[in-house]
Image (cartoon, rainbow, N blue to C red):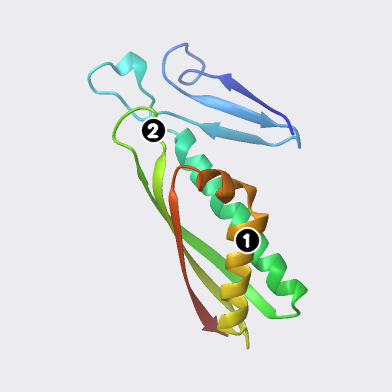
Amino acid sequence: MECTVNWTGALGTRSGMGFVAETGSGHTLVMDGAPDAAKPENGGLNLAPRPMETLLAGAGGCTAYDVVLILKRGRHDVRGCSVQLQADRADSDPKVFTKINMHFTVSGKGVPASAVERAIAMSHDKYCSASVMLGKTAAISTSFEVREL
Protein backbone atom coordinates (compact mmCIF):
# COMPACT_ATOMS: atom_id res chain seq x y z
CA MET A 1 0.00 0.00 0.00
CA GLU A 2 1.30 3.45 -0.89
CA CYS A 3 0.30 7.05 -0.38
CA THR A 4 1.99 10.39 -1.07
CA VAL A 5 0.91 13.46 0.88
CA ASN A 6 1.82 16.91 -0.49
CA TRP A 7 1.52 20.21 1.31
CA THR A 8 -0.54 22.56 -0.84
CA GLY A 9 -0.61 25.56 1.46
CA ALA A 10 -3.69 27.68 1.01
CA LEU A 11 -4.94 27.82 -2.55
CA GLY A 12 -1.48 27.67 -4.07
CA THR A 13 0.24 29.91 -1.54
CA ARG A 14 2.86 28.57 0.81
CA SER A 15 0.88 29.50 3.87
CA GLY A 16 -1.87 27.49 5.47
CA MET A 17 -1.99 23.82 6.30
CA GLY A 18 -3.68 22.20 3.31
CA PHE A 19 -2.55 18.77 2.10
CA VAL A 20 -3.48 16.46 -0.77
CA ALA A 21 -2.97 12.73 -0.41
CA GLU A 22 -2.54 10.66 -3.56
CA THR A 23 -3.21 7.00 -2.87
CA GLY A 24 -1.64 4.02 -4.53
CA SER A 25 -5.03 3.15 -6.02
CA GLY A 26 -5.04 6.48 -7.88
CA HIS A 27 -7.40 8.52 -5.73
CA THR A 28 -6.93 11.85 -3.99
CA LEU A 29 -7.98 13.05 -0.59
CA VAL A 30 -7.81 16.66 0.55
CA MET A 31 -7.08 17.55 4.19
CA ASP A 32 -6.69 20.84 6.05
CA GLY A 33 -5.83 21.99 9.54
CA ALA A 34 -7.96 23.92 11.96
CA PRO A 35 -7.59 27.71 11.89
CA ASP A 36 -5.19 29.10 14.53
CA ALA A 37 -6.38 32.50 15.76
CA ALA A 38 -3.18 33.13 17.70
CA LYS A 39 -0.85 32.33 14.77
CA PRO A 40 -2.85 32.33 11.51
CA GLU A 41 0.23 31.37 9.50
CA ASN A 42 0.38 28.08 11.42
CA GLY A 43 -3.27 27.17 11.02
CA GLY A 44 -5.47 25.87 8.27
CA LEU A 45 -8.39 27.50 6.49
CA ASN A 46 -11.03 24.91 7.35
CA LEU A 47 -11.36 23.91 3.68
CA ALA A 48 -11.30 20.13 4.22
CA PRO A 49 -11.40 17.47 6.93
CA ARG A 50 -8.63 17.34 9.51
CA PRO A 51 -6.18 14.43 9.23
CA MET A 52 -7.51 12.86 12.44
CA GLU A 53 -11.07 13.12 11.11
CA THR A 54 -9.98 11.18 8.03
CA LEU A 55 -8.42 8.54 10.28
CA LEU A 56 -11.72 8.18 12.16
CA ALA A 57 -13.66 8.09 8.88
CA GLY A 58 -11.31 5.40 7.58
CA ALA A 59 -12.02 3.24 10.61
CA GLY A 60 -15.74 3.72 10.06
CA GLY A 61 -15.46 2.81 6.39
CA CYS A 62 -13.34 -0.24 7.18
CA THR A 63 -15.74 -1.66 9.74
CA ALA A 64 -18.91 -0.80 7.77
CA TYR A 65 -17.40 -2.57 4.75
CA ASP A 66 -16.83 -5.67 6.88
CA VAL A 67 -20.33 -5.62 8.38
CA VAL A 68 -22.01 -5.39 4.97
CA LEU A 69 -19.78 -8.11 3.49
CA ILE A 70 -20.32 -10.47 6.42
CA LEU A 71 -24.10 -9.97 6.28
CA LYS A 72 -24.17 -10.48 2.49
CA ARG A 73 -22.10 -13.64 2.81
CA GLY A 74 -24.65 -14.84 5.36
CA ARG A 75 -27.30 -14.32 2.65
CA HIS A 76 -29.07 -11.61 4.61
CA ASP A 77 -31.09 -9.03 2.66
CA VAL A 78 -29.08 -6.02 3.87
CA ARG A 79 -29.93 -2.82 2.00
CA GLY A 80 -28.23 -0.11 4.03
CA CYS A 81 -25.52 0.34 6.60
CA SER A 82 -24.22 3.44 8.30
CA VAL A 83 -21.95 3.89 11.27
CA GLN A 84 -21.83 7.01 13.39
CA LEU A 85 -18.53 7.44 15.21
CA GLN A 86 -17.88 9.55 18.28
CA ALA A 87 -14.31 9.83 19.55
CA ASP A 88 -12.49 11.40 22.48
CA ARG A 89 -8.83 12.35 22.28
CA ALA A 90 -6.07 12.73 24.84
CA ASP A 91 -5.61 16.25 26.22
CA SER A 92 -1.87 16.35 25.59
CA ASP A 93 0.39 15.41 22.67
CA PRO A 94 0.24 13.01 21.06
CA LYS A 95 -3.50 13.53 21.10
CA VAL A 96 -4.41 9.94 20.32
CA PHE A 97 -7.95 8.65 20.37
CA THR A 98 -8.79 7.39 23.87
CA LYS A 99 -12.45 6.39 23.38
CA ILE A 100 -14.40 5.59 20.23
CA ASN A 101 -18.06 4.62 20.03
CA MET A 102 -19.38 3.16 16.78
CA HIS A 103 -23.16 3.11 16.40
CA PHE A 104 -24.33 1.06 13.42
CA THR A 105 -27.67 1.37 11.70
CA VAL A 106 -28.38 -1.58 9.43
CA SER A 107 -31.47 -1.71 7.27
CA GLY A 108 -32.91 -4.53 5.23
CA LYS A 109 -35.59 -7.17 5.04
CA GLY A 110 -35.61 -9.72 7.83
CA VAL A 111 -32.04 -9.08 8.97
CA PRO A 112 -31.76 -10.64 12.44
CA ALA A 113 -30.24 -8.54 15.21
CA SER A 114 -28.07 -11.52 16.16
CA ALA A 115 -26.49 -11.52 12.68
CA VAL A 116 -25.74 -7.80 12.91
CA GLU A 117 -24.25 -8.21 16.38
CA ARG A 118 -22.08 -11.09 15.13
CA ALA A 119 -20.93 -9.15 12.03
CA ILE A 120 -19.93 -6.13 14.16
CA ALA A 121 -18.04 -8.36 16.60
CA MET A 122 -16.22 -10.17 13.78
CA SER A 123 -15.21 -6.87 12.20
CA HIS A 124 -14.10 -5.39 15.51
CA ASP A 125 -12.23 -8.47 16.73
CA LYS A 126 -10.77 -9.90 13.53
CA TYR A 127 -11.18 -8.16 10.19
CA CYS A 128 -11.06 -4.35 10.49
CA SER A 129 -7.37 -3.54 10.68
CA ALA A 130 -8.14 0.14 11.27
CA SER A 131 -10.22 -0.43 14.39
CA VAL A 132 -7.80 -3.10 15.66
CA MET A 133 -4.96 -0.55 15.38
CA LEU A 134 -6.99 2.22 17.01
CA GLY A 135 -7.96 -0.22 19.75
CA LYS A 136 -4.33 -0.14 20.91
CA THR A 137 -4.89 3.36 22.35
CA ALA A 138 -8.68 3.73 22.46
CA ALA A 139 -11.44 1.87 24.24
CA ILE A 140 -13.81 1.01 21.39
CA SER A 141 -17.47 0.39 22.10
CA THR A 142 -20.21 -0.53 19.65
CA SER A 143 -23.96 -0.35 19.52
CA PHE A 144 -26.45 -0.96 16.74
CA GLU A 145 -30.01 -0.84 15.56
CA VAL A 146 -31.75 -2.77 12.80
CA ARG A 147 -34.36 -1.08 10.65
CA GLU A 148 -36.84 -3.20 8.75
CA LEU A 149 -37.57 -2.03 5.20
Q: Residues within 10 Å of mark 1 (few under 14, many from 20)?
A: many
> What's the amino acid at mark 1?
Ser
Q: Could you say whether the residue bearing mark 1 is in a helix, strand or loop?
A: helix
111 shown above or below 3: below
The crowd level at tag 2 (other Cα within 10 Å; few <14, some 14-19, many 20+) is some
Left or right placement of residue 90 versus residue 145 in this view: left
Q: Looking at the rendering, in which quadrant would you find the N terminus?
A: top right
Identify the residue at image location x=58%, y=81%. Answer: 114
Name the outermost residue toward the top.
Answer: 14
**Residue in view at x 27 percent, y 16 percent:** 39
> Between disc 1 and disc 2, whose residue precedes?
2
Is residue 54 positioned above or below 67 on the image? above
> Of 50 and 40, which appears nearest the observer?
50
Pinpoint residue 107: horizontal percent, then vertical percent. 57, 77
The residue indicated by pointer 2 is 46
- Residue position marked by numbered label 1 in the rendering: 123
Q: Gap between marks 1 and 2, in whole Å?
A: 32 Å
Q: Quadrant of residue 25?
A: top right
